[in-house]
Amino acid sequence: MWLPGLMSVPEELADRAARFGDRTAVRVDGGPALTYREWDRMANAVARGMAAAGVSRGDRVVLLLTNAEACDFAIAFAACHRAGAAAVPVNPRYAAREIDHILRDSGARLVVAGTEIERVHGVPARSCEQLATGGDAPTACELSPDDLSEIFYTSGTTGLPRGVASTHANSAQHAMAPLEAGGVLLHSIPLATFTGVQGGVLTPLRLAVTALVLPRFDAARFAELIAAEHPLWLLMVPAHILLLLESGVLEGCDTSSVAIAMFGGAPTPPAAVLRLGELLPNAMLLNGYGLTEGGGSVCVLPPGEAARRPGSVGKPMRGVEVRIVDDLGDPVATDETGEITLRIPAGERRYWNDPEASARTWRAGWVHTGDLGRLDGDGFLYVIDRAKDVIIRGGYNVASAEVESAIHEQPDIAECAVVGIPHPILGQDIAAVVRLRDGAAALTLDDLRGRLADALADYKLPRVLILTTEPLPRNPSGKLNKPAIIEMTA
């Protein structure tokens, strides 16, 4: 049963179309635009096309679309809900084997792609234009709050992407009051991520503002759009912030319109947050700490707190609970370090097809993040370390185990370890420490990247290669000693 005051995505879109039909909903910089009325009409048409293609309630539909195709992404996402199906956003930058894994793991019935192709790894594929042939009369499948709404695939710590399943109740808890006056939300976040959907699609829908999408982040163009479009909202990852600061493009730029700047996906240097606040003097900084498993758990960093509490990601927003626990799951004292656990109003998500992993992560209503952190006496959260062995490169999670496995597939590799190393813009970059087999030919970084190109997405390829002739350091149990290996990269 739906909670009072909450609406499903199809209901919200119909409401926005009725109230703000001529307002631009999505606009791609240098590309197409979509009004709320057009979005609603096309979502109906594509939903009918999905049904004609055999999609029914509970089926999964993969969205294989880029940010340049943001209008089609928004249409297809809403159409999935109208058809009663679950949307499965997939990053087009994934390697072929990753996409194949997601299609198989999700049991996808259909792929919505940006080009007219017949199949993707054996699954039927259609473009929005091909699907929108069955009429655009209003249509909507009866939805339950417990029905599957999306599966977001994240690399996590296990190598191949793992699906996090969300329900309509999970999504509805983010509902907001629309802004009658409208406005612009500017971003360049990949739409095929949890942040991209929640921040780049659903937040603009719920506020009834225009999502202005920059297909690929460019600091100079981002600043130009701030000055020209006067956005109320910005959505960024830390790499965007660092590029903006390094380039100096915000110096002298009219940023007075920005009321809220949202960022997250990786730790942001405290000095950068402080400087960002100076360059956005009218903005509240929303530092989004969370993970796909935790949903929309965010922290607010009020103006002035960046200087008073360097390193804090802010205070949990209303309705979100944060607890720091020890190895036994018991709460620790104020300012003590432990595992960060989260509880959000909409209840638990789950891993798709993995009940054992679900039971480890979601326990008695709390999400166990695997991240280390502390809470100060005023309830502000500090993230001490990210989940074990996950490298966060420019907002993308890269599992070191996956990269190591791909390297180990090469016949002349005896041992390898992959670690994250500091990067001034991306936060972290990827270093591979490799010991070759005796007699193996010399290996260069370009050689290694070329060998891995078919197995890994480009952002997962190592940027640093260190060759060693000594066995890699290991702890007494035989596991790789990652701290010692990181020292080898210095």
Image (cartoon, rainbow, N blue to C red):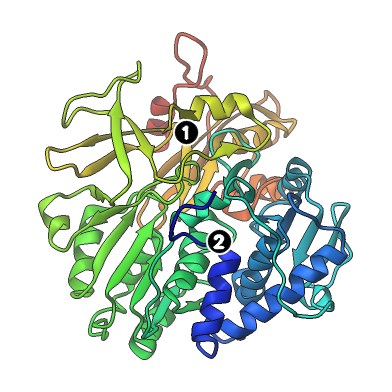
- Crowding at dot 1, Cα within 10 Å, few <14 / some 14-19 / many 20+, comes out as some
Q: Is residue 116 left or right of residue 63?
A: right
The residue lying at 75 percent from left, 53 percent from top is: 57
Q: Amino acid at mark 1?
A: Asp
Using the image as rendered, state which of residue 131 and residue 91 is in the foreground. 131
Q: Is residue 262 above or below residue 428?
A: below
The residue under label 1 is 389
Give the image location of residue 105, x and y in percent: 74, 40
Asked if residue 28 shows in the view, the reply is: no
The answer to whether marks 2 and 1 mark residues whose Cβ atoms lie closer than 8 Å is no
Give the image location of residue 10, x and y in percent: 60, 67
Q: Secondary structure at mark 1?
A: loop
Give the image location of residue 490, x and y in percent: 37, 38
Q: Amino acid at mark 2?
A: Ser
The residue under label 2 is 8
Q: Is residue 408 left or right of residue 301?
A: right
The residue lying at 16 percent from left, 63 percent from top is: 303
- Crowding at dot 2, Cα within 10 Å, few <14 / some 14-19 / many 20+, comes out as many
Q: CA distance from mark 2 to mark 1?
A: 37 Å
